[in-house]
Image (cartoon, rainbow, N blue to C red):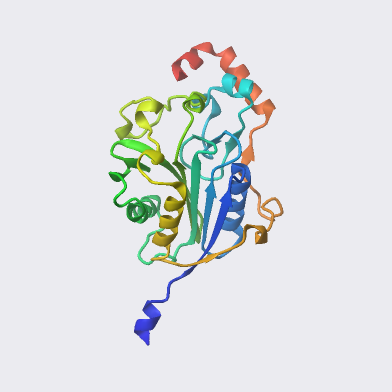
Amino acid sequence: MSRAKDLVLPSMNLIIMKSSPILRQLRMEEKLLRSTSENWCIINDGTSDPTIVMGVSGKVQELVNVESVMGDGIPVIRRFSGGGTVIVDGGTVFVSLICNKGAVPGLQPYPRSIMDWTGELYGRVFGGFGDFHLRENDYAFGSRKFGGNAQSITKDRWIHHTSFLWDYDVKNMGYLKQPTRAPKYRLERHHMEFLCRMKDYFPCRSTFIERTIAALSSHFSVTLIENKTIIDPSNTKHATSTKLLTKQELEATLSSLHENPTVQQVLL
């Protein structure tokens, strides 16, 4: 009887979306992290429009080419979790894991421990489809990054979310500045030398999604939840810290850069 108990897996709710706006996704994740006690996996296959997403402490003037972003009307979001800055679009596949601290036996609720566990999880997903590595806080094939991660840890729960570059538009990468803080393995490479596309290593997006669900099923009893049954993330009691930067905020940043051209040169 005790042996049967050991085989009982914790439950995980699975939400699969297609081209949902990344702002809606992030607000949904923040609500599920802070307002529920269940384990969740959210998969969003692409997002509707090119959008820049920064970590909670990211500085626009250091990370974004503000003038070109404003000129082309690219939205900029500050999410509730840490991590770096990415530009996402229809070529990005998002996978987010929201878990209770005791959901994975032996997993310590610390960033490195969570990162190592997800690295093993995705190692099974990508097994046989490229030279997969967890490099510092990134997922990479060889020495080129294709998955960027961010985390947030609360008292009883944690979230680990990833933007996977199935494909990307070279032009969009020009909206991002070369970060002043970067992983050592980047070796000061520019975006095009540092990044790679999943589609060059993996057969199709649906196969990736199927293998991700299969890998999760070795740790959780996964139940698909209809997206329409999830309460609107805007209707929530907790204070959301995920926000779309206003035109006024971007204009203020641009003005400060113009007033301090020497600072702008250093950042560029």
Residue 101 in view in this figure: yes
Horizontal side, residue 131 vs residue 118: left or right = left
11 lies above or below 80: below
Between residue 245 and residue 140, name the one nearer to us: 140
19 lies above or below 85: below
Between residue 209 and residue 34, name the one nearer to us: 209
Horizontal side, residue 142 vs residue 231: left or right = left
**Could you tell me how many numbered marks the image carries?**
0
Residue shown at 36%/54% (left/top)? 125
Q: Give residue 219's position: percent from left, percent from top.
A: 40, 66
Q: Give residue 20's position: percent from left, percent from top.
A: 61, 46
Q: Quadrant of the N terminus?
A: bottom left
Q: Give residue 239's position: percent from left, percent from top.
A: 66, 50
Residue shown at 60%/19% (left/top)? 254
Q: Give residue 158's position: percent from left, percent from top.
A: 48, 56
**Residue pushed farthest bottom?**
1
**Residue pushed farthest front?**
203
**Residue pushed farthest right?**
235
Horizontal side, residue 128 vs residue 182: left or right = left
Residue shown at 42%/65% (left/top)? 217
Residue 252 in view in this figure: no
157 lies above or below 143: below
